[in-house]
Image: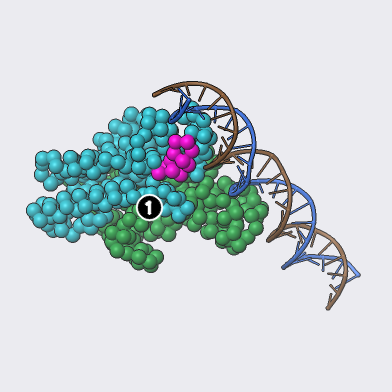
Chain colours: A cyan, B green, C brown, D blue
DNA sequence: TCGTTTGAATTAAACGTTTGTTTAGTTTTT
DNA sequence: AAAAACTAAACAAACGTTTAATTCAAACGA
């Protein structure tokens, strides 16, 4: 599916509104108005509102594997590899945070006729890479053995998402404001906290 | 605000539908049908659909502080206190998971005219208790000092929520099915993982 | 114990809006 | 001249809410 410039623009506007107000809380008239187009263009370009969401997710969740492989092949010990992996995951998710929010919310909606295939296969690939890295570290005697590997990803991504979904609360608590300051906090302090947490867990018990 | 039996029943049905399909994705006709009542009863009892959400959140987020205080006053060392606190938080949130899901997604919606006061004040109280416990542990030389306390709660709750929001995925990965088995996994394995993670973090660096 | 009164509970139907989508026609590009 | 892009208007369906009428249960005076 090839997208022209105008289609990408419409999807960008729709993504923002979907993340803010939800899919059902956003009307095609709202999207059209904000994107500066006629309502009929949504059906014209995407077929329907729901197929537009499909196109959005397809567009956003492409190319994950290639990037991840590149990061995982970087030089360094097991602890460095964990750091690189977490930093990459947080960056990738923060960049696509709106699309992820829509998925998190709509994934459980039984009415939604949308393909979450790309999202799921991305999760599976992601998990396999994490599993391999940790198992190798365990065999090398660097990581503890009594670790629930499947729950590492919820810890990494969950920490980010909970922070992001409650950002109104945490930004007030931490006295942060402004988009740039938020991005900076995520890429430095929040990422460091997650790296520290996971490494502490992996280094805790008996090897 | 006193709620009679029928009102509680309606709220329970509404909560389930809101969590599954979203607030905007659920119609009052759907709620009325599933609850076995006439549509007009929603306006009659609550004033409007949005005020019904207000009543739901007010109803669900009451009594948190008292329970939490009770748990925190239990005997035990710092590690035991951390265990008790995390077990309580996970149980409390899993019990009210639907209401929390609604809040997580509606909290950022600028159109929603709902009071999140109770939710916020609960978060603040929760944070203060955690902060006090960890600072005491640090002064006693039990916990590491280079900890970002504000980000502990995102790690605890985020791990749970990410698991819950993607339960379709994780249940397939872990080969779990059935409501009871899920509850059991949450209360045992998932809780243990989070306890292990936080204790590893708190015991990691220099005291 | 009776019929009557009263206020709350409940109902079907209608209200005006808003929804996503389509149509038929016009403009722009190739 | 053909194809693609775009528009205003209309469509039926669904939305949350209100109305006016009815049922119900408890309270009351005789």
User: Which residue is drawn at the image coordinates 10% and 40% (left, top)?
Assistant: A75
Residue D19 screen position, x and y as percent: 75, 48
Q: Quadrant of the N terminus of chain A?
A: top left
Which secondary structure type mostly characterizes the magenta part of the structure?
helix
Mark 1 surroundings within 10 Å by alpha-carbon count, few (fewer than 14), some (14 through 19), many (20 or more)? many
- Residue A45 rendering spot, x and y as whole percentages: 44, 36
Residue range corresponding to the magenta coloring: A42-54
Residue B158 in the image: above or below residue A93: below
Q: Position of residue B172 (x, y in %)?
A: 31, 60
Q: Secondary structure at mark 1?
A: helix
Q: Residue at x 54, y 55 (%)?
A: B14
Res B192 quadrant in image:
bottom left
Residue D4 higher or lower than A20, as above or below: above
On the picture, is B119 further left or further right than B49?
A: left
Tell me the quadrant of the picture where the C terminus of chain A can be found: bottom left
Q: Nearer the viewer, residue B70 or D30?
A: D30
Count of residue discs: 1
Residue A9 location, quadrant = top left
Name the residue nearer the viewer: B16 or B4: B16
Report in which chain the residue with disc 1 lies. B
Residue picked out by circle 1 = B165
User: Which residue appears farthest toward the left when viewing the image?
Assistant: A140
User: Which residue does the image show at 12% across and 52% down from the upper left?
Assistant: A137
Any magenta on residue A51?
yes
Q: Position of residue B43 (x, y in %)?
A: 64, 51
């Amino acid at each position: 599916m090839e997208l022209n410039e105008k289609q990408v623009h419409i999807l960008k506007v729709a993504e923002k509104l979907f993340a803010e107000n939800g899919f059902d809380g956003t009307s095609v008239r709202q999207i059209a108005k904000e994107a500066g187009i006629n309502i009929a263009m949504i059906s014209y370009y995407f077929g329907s509102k729901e197929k537009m969401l499909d196109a959005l997710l397809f567009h956003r969740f492409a190319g994950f594997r290639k990037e991840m492989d590149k990061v995982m092949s970087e030089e360094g010990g097991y602890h460095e590899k964990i750091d690189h992996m977490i930093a990459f995951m947080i960056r990738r998710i923060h960049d696509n945070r709106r699309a992820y929010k829509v998925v998190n919310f709509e994934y459980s909606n039984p009415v939604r006729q949308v393909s979450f295939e790309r999202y799921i296969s991305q999760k599976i690939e992601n998990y396999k890479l994490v599993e391999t890295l940790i198992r190798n570290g365990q065999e090398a005697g660097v990581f503890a053995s009594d670790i629930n590997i499947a729950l590492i990803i919820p810890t990494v991504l969950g920490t980010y998402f909970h922070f992001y979904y409650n950002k109104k609360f945490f930004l007030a608590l931490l006295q942060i404001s402004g988009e740039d300051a938020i991005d900076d906090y995520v890429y430095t302090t929040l990422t460091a906290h997650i790296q520290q947490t996971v490494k502490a867990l992996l280094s805790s018990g008996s090897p």
